[in-house]
């Protein structure tokens, strides 16, 4: 077990301790910190996994780009889980492919993709 001392602004510490005790009783602050740490660790692992999956999908795209441009110009493509998942004539035909993937590339071959797409919402996964 590790003992860690950190400085928290007084107003945050007071509110944290009050809410934690209301929720869990006298052991509330310790339990709430354990939950917060577990949640943070899960979030970091998820981000690291997403980053790795994104890198793998981008690597597959670079490897397949020439073939896709020769064989599937104007078609819609899905790359996920480090592999080509499918090709279709319309976005609707490929929209349901690899929907459980943390990261997937969905694009029309021959169109320049946007450099960066901003997420407008966060999808909850079960």
Image (cartoon, grey):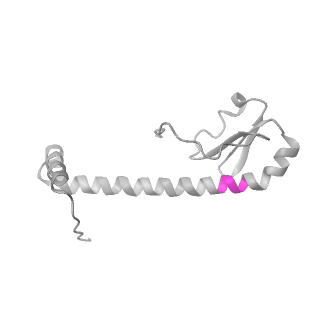
Is 87 situated above or below 24?
A: above
Give the residue at x 73% y 43%. 112
Whether residue 58 is in magenta: the answer is: yes
Give the residue at x 79% y 52%. 64
Residue 63, image x and y in percent?
Answer: 77, 56
Q: Residue furthest right?
A: 70
Residue 83, image x and y in percent?
Answer: 71, 50
Give the residue at x 59% y 42%. 117
Residue 62, image x and y in percent?
Answer: 75, 55
Whether residue 30 is in magenta: the answer is: no
Residue 124, image x and y in percent?
Answer: 46, 39
Give the residue at x 23% y 65%. 6
Horizontal side of 100 relative to 121 (left or right) equals right
Horizontal side of 121 relative to 37 (left or right) equals right
Q: Relative to the observer, which residue lies in front, 98 or 61?
A: 61
Q: Quadrant of residue 90?
A: top right
Magenta range: 56-60
Horizontal side of 15 relative to 91 (left or right) equals left
Quarter of the image with the N terminus is: bottom left
């Amino acid at each position: 077990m590790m003992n860690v001392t950190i400085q928290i602004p007084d107003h945050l510490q007071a509110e944290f301790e009050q809410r934690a005790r209301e929720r869990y009783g006298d052991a509330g602050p310790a339990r709430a910190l354990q939950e917060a740490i577990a949640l943070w660790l899960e979030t970091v692992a998820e981000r690291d996994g997403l980053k790795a999956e994104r890198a793998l999908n981008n690597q597959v795209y670079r490897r397949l780009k020439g073939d896709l441009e020769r064989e599937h110009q104007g078609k819609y493509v899905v790359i996920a889980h480090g592999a080509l998942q499918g090709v279709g004539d319309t976005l609707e035909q490929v929209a349901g492919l690899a929907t459980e993937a943390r990261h997937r590339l969905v694009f029309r071959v021959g169109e320049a993709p946007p450099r960066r797409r901003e997420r407008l919402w966060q999808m909850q996964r079960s």
